[in-house]
Amino acid sequence: MTAIIGASVFSIVIILSFLIICGLPLGELTMGGQYKVFPKKLRIILVTQLILQIFFVIIILQVGGFIPLWFSDNITKIICIVMAIYLSLNTIMNFISKSKKEKYVMTPLSAISAVCFWITALTH
């Protein structure tokens, strides 16, 4: 169940990333709120990040047993743990952000995702 919750919450981040890539004025949700609308050059970087985010949703669903494994069970769990570590650090960075929108929107999304990635990786 935590894999589904983690994938769902992290999918909200994916949707927000997609909207930022499309040029919507949601840039204050990321990178300390430096940009209201992300510059086109930075959006290219976000596309790479978006692909990785989708990959990590697939990984948590694989560890949770909801879709077939692409890699061995051990490799998939290691990827899930690496993502849990990343999301834990990301939660801290979002919490100390100067952007109130990033702090109050992205911190909870990142924290919930991190907890779900940890629980899924360590219990399956």
Image (spheres, grey):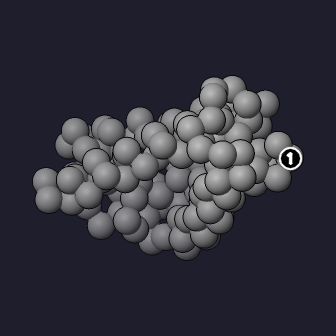
Observer able to see residue 101: yes
Residue 39: % across, % down: 16, 57
Question: Which residue is located at x 66 percent, y 46 percent?
Answer: 72
Q: Is residue 106 left or right of residue 17?
A: right
Q: Is residue 11 left or right of residue 67?
A: left
Q: Check disc 1 and report the residue beneath it.
A: 123
Camera-side residue: 18 or 108?
18
Residue 91: % across, % down: 60, 63
Q: Secondary structure at mark 1?
A: helix
Q: Is residue 75 above or below residue 62?
A: below
Q: Residues within 10 Å of mark 1 (few under 14, many from 20)?
A: few
Observer able to see residue 10: no
Camera-side residue: 6 or 25?
6
Camera-side residue: 48 or 75?
75
Camera-side residue: 82 or 27?
82
Question: Which residue is located at x 40 percent, y 68 percent?
Answer: 32
Residue 84: % across, % down: 66, 58
Residue 8: % across, % down: 60, 32
Question: Which residue is located at x 59 percent, y 44 percent?
Answer: 71
Q: Is residue 36 above or below residue 56?
A: below
Q: Is residue 18 above or below residue 82?
A: above
Quadrant of image for the C terminus: top right
Total labels: the figure holds: 1
Give the amino acid at mark 1.
Thr
Question: Which residue is located at x 79 percent, y 30 percent?
Answer: 1
Snapshot quadrant of residue 20: top left
Residue extending farthest front = 72
